[in-house]
Amino acid sequence: MADQLVSDGLRSELRKLSVLKGTAPEFDPSAAPESPMELFGEWFMLAVRSGVREPHAMTLSTVGADGRPSARVLILKDVDSAGWHFAISTLSRKGCDLAARPFAALTFYWPELVRQVRVSGPVVADPPAVAAADFLARPEGSKQMALTRRQSQPFDRPEELDEALEHARQELNSTPDLVPDEWCSYAVRPDEVEFWQGDPQRRHQRLRYTATGNSWLRTRLWP
Ligand SMILES: Cc1cc2nc3c(=O)[nH]c(=O)nc-3n(C[C@H](O)[C@H](O)[C@H](O)COP(=O)(O)O)c2cc1C
């Protein structure tokens, strides 16, 4: 009964909510650049200029050894010819997933521009120097938390966190340039990237880039 009431209230709220209410910029798929990295750069810079909140937040989807998908939000670190980069602890659930199945999908959603970008492909570890540079540039609190080395484990005793953070502080005090072995930077090397420009009338524009050796095949998709 309680479930029913929650569900009724939630359902009616859901019906009232609007979607695709942003301001869609012009997008001409036939004039799109040859590489998806270039188009991503254009879209990303426009997202920044347009005041999209946290445009570098993306959903990273992985698959575990058991075949089950899992998704979470992460921060994009770079995009270049090697792909879309992010840095994580290999001890976390996503790290274990990638060790078991080195493939991932990334999803960006920029509601202010009614835009979505989807990236997918194999995931390749960057050279250790990239991970080190990323770790060393992190805020102190982020480094300390990473050094607890417990992300994604069951959290039973809050005092354990204080102890682990204190230990991490001491580790960093004695070795300020410490980079934990399990810190890893990865690149999703896309074999597919799709740009989606939403339209309130549902005439969405979709452009998919598919890797074909040294070049990209561009295909428009039905909305
Ligand atoms: C906006 C945003 C940014 C985040 N950035 C990171 C990040 O840079 N690194 C990270 O490990 N988790 C980040 N998280 C938390 C992850 O979504 C996730 O909870 C965490 O990485 C554990 O995921 P896992 O258990 O699947 O490994 C962020 C979450 C949000 C909402």
Image (cartoon, rainbow, N blue to C red):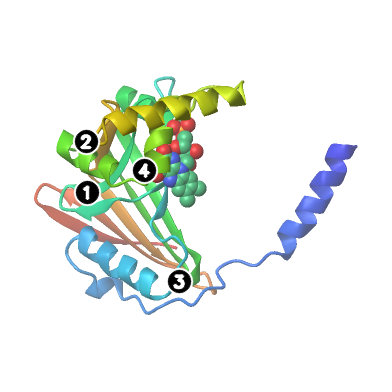
Q: Earlier in the sequence, mark 4 or mark 1?
A: 1
How many angstroms separate mark 1 from mark 2 (CA)? 9 Å
Contact between labelled residues 4 and 2, with CB atoms less than 8 Å apart: no
Q: Is 16 positioned to the left or the right of 70 in the image?
A: right
Q: Nearer the viewer, residue 91 or 31?
A: 91
Instruction: Assign a secondary structure to mark 1.
Output: strand
Comparing 80 with 20, the one in front is: 80
Residue type highlighted by circle 3: Leu
Residue under circle 1? 83
Kind of residue sitting beneath label 2: Val
Residue at mark 2:
124
Residue nearest the viewer, comparing 105 with 164: 164
The part of the image, by quadrant, that contains residue 19 is: bottom right
Q: Looking at the image, is mark 3 or mark 4 earlier in the sequence?
A: 4
Viewer-side label of 2, 4: 2
Q: Residue placed at 26% from the left, 42% from the top?
A: 136
Given contact means CB atoms under 8 Å apart, are the residues at marks 1 and 2 in contact?
Answer: yes
Furthest-left residue in view? 214
The Cα atoms of the two marked residues, 4 and 1, are separated by 12 Å
Q: Position of residue 125 (x, y in %)?
A: 21, 34
Disc 2 crowd, CA 10 A, few/some/many (<14, 14-19, 20+): some
Seen at 49% across and 27% down, the residue is 152
Q: Earlier in the sequence, mark 1 or mark 2?
A: 1
Residue 105: mark: 4
Ligand 1 is located in which of the four quadrants?
top left
Q: Residues within 10 Å of mark 1 (few under 14, many from 20)?
A: many
Which mark, by number, is residue 113? Answer: 3
In the picture, measured across the screen, residue 20 lies left or right of residue 85, that is right
Q: Earlier in the sequence, mark 3 or mark 2?
A: 3
Mark 3 vs 4: CB contact within 8 A: no
In the picture, residue 56 is in which quadrant?
bottom left
